Amino acid sequence: DTGVSQDPRHKITKRGQNVTFRCDPISEHNRLYWYRQTLGQGPEFLTYFQNEAQLEKSRLLSDRFSAERPKGSFSTLEIQRTEQGDSAMYLCASSWGGRYSSYEQYFGPGTRLTVT
Amino acid sequence: GENVGLHLPTLSVQEGDNSIINCAYSNSASDYFIWYKQESGKGPQFIIDIRSNMDKRQGQRVTVLLNKTVKHLSLQIAATQPGDSAVYFCAEKPVGYSTLTFGKGTMLLVSP
């Protein structure tokens, strides 16, 4: 399978704990995006990388959230001191950004986070 | 994801009908638009896209129409099939940015 993969698919954690999610983009894609989706809503942009550089961050991304893409391939999203309001589906997407980029983003299956 | 269709506008059609899903976008400076399909428990799946210098684009069984005057986007699905049942999202990209802003979504229910 050469699509975007995410791990874990489901995570249940207690309030106050830290969690980390991983995303492996499509191998030739240089752009990687993180989104959050709650029930009944469309995905909300969190942050975006081009290669290893984090180029945009949403105001939604509080200082408890941090994302990295150290080698320009896979990315991790960490949430520190989780709160019940962090319960959501966390989606990763990737795309090719270049001179003839189409902006079409390919999404992974998501990580469902439940904070109890 | 699961139950992504809660509280969403719903379009119910019979198999074989044509479906039209509408979307009002917010930013007149957006230069790229895209439609995604999301089935329960899965991530969004690309359907079709269109740039702002076009007003119509066709794919296999799908057509996207763009009316920039009224900031309206529509997705037409021909000969709708039960496998088309899902939540459909439109998204826009503001000029100068690489990120997408998603709309609220519409649930499409196709009865056999």
Image: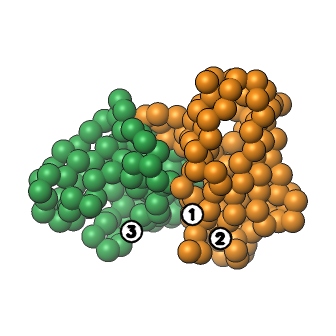
Check chain identity for marks 2 and 3: say if they share one.
no
Q: Nearer the viewer, mark 3 or mark 1?
A: 1
Q: Which of marks 2 and 1 precedes in the sequence?
A: 2
Chain depicted in green: B
Chain to which mark 1 belongs: A
Residue nearest the observer in this picture, B28 or A5: A5
Chain to which mark 2 belongs: A
Name the side, left or right, on which A81 lies relative to B56: right
Q: Type of residue at label 3?
A: Arg
Residue under pointer 3: B57
Residue A106: numbered disc: 1
Q: Type of residue at label 2?
A: Ile
Residue nearest the observer in this picture, A103 or B14: B14
Determine the secondary structure under disc 2. Answer: loop
Chain to which mark 3 belongs: B
Q: Residue A53: image x %, image y %?
A: 86, 57
* Tint applied to chain A in the drawing: orange
Q: Residue at x 43, y 34 (%)?
A: A40
Mark 3 nearby-residue class (10 Å; few <14, some 14–19, many ≥20): some
A21 vs A19: above or below: below
Residue under pointer 2: A26
Q: Residue at x 23, y 43 (%)?
A: B11
A111 vs B83: above or below: above
Q: Residue at x 46, y 53 (%)?
A: B42
A67 vs A24: above or below: above
Q: Residue at x 49, y 41 (%)?
A: A42
Q: Residue B62: image x %, image y %?
A: 31, 66
Q: Nearer the viewer, mark 2 or mark 3?
A: 2
- Quadrant the C terminus of chain B occupies: bottom left
Q: Residue B79: image x %, image y %?
A: 17, 65
Check chain identity for marks 3 and 1: say if they share one.
no
